[in-house]
Amino acid sequence: MRYLALALLLVGCAASKGRLNTPSGGPEIVIQNVTETQVKGACLDWCSKHGFRIDDQTDNHITANTAHYLDDGQGVLSMYQNVDLTFNKEHSAVHLFGELHGYAPDTVGTQDQREWMLGELKKIDETLTYPHGR
């Protein structure tokens, strides 16, 4: 019985993660004619603008987090978010992957989070593709 409950829990967790229309099914984009250094700089700028503190960074990966404290009328609710950004050079392009992990009720691995992250990756792309605006 315990194994059945565990199996159902794992299936439920896997089902809660949405799939996007990308090769991996997750938030990802390919940015043309840039270097990994440029993409890393744009990702660090994005983290700073969105209130994320850098936990760890390498030549091709950034892990950052942020915390928000909301008063729901019955006390303070803490909402934590972690973001992982990974970027890899592929010929004349850089492949950028992002994943947002929320730690609050009903927010872990939701389709909305994945779609939001994909939209944010596209904004990072625009800062590199159109550095002076359109």
Image (cartoon, grey):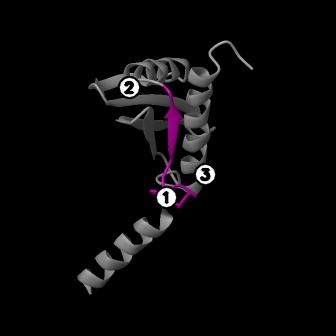
> Residue 78: horizontal and vertical position, in percent?
48, 36
Tell me if residue 29 is in the magenta stretch. Answer: yes
> Residue 34: horizontal and vertical position, in percent?
47, 24
Amino acid under label 3? Asp
Amino acid under label 1? Gly
Answer few, some or many: residues within 10 Å of disc 2's Cα (few below 14, many 20 plus, some between 14 and 19): many
Q: How many marks?
A: 3
Residue tagged 2: 36
Which residue is more in the foreground, 33 or 65?
A: 33
**Of tags 3 and 2, which is closer to the observer?**
2
Quarter of the picture containing the N terminus is bottom left
Which residue is more in the foreground, 53 or 37?
A: 37
Q: Give the residues drawn in magenta, as a range.
A: 18-33
Quarter of the picture containing the C terminus is top right
Q: Is residue 34 above or below residue 24?
A: above
**Of tags 1 and 3, which is closer to the observer?**
1
Residue tagged 1: 25
Answer few, some or many: residues within 10 Å of disc 3's Cα (few below 14, many 20 plus, some between 14 and 19): few
Q: Is residue 81 visible?
A: no
Amino acid under label 2? Glu
Image quarter of residue 73: top right
As drawn, which residue projects farthest toward the right?
A: 134
Q: Is residue 48 visible?
A: yes
Residue tagged 3: 112
Choose the circle earlier in sequence order: 1 or 3: 1
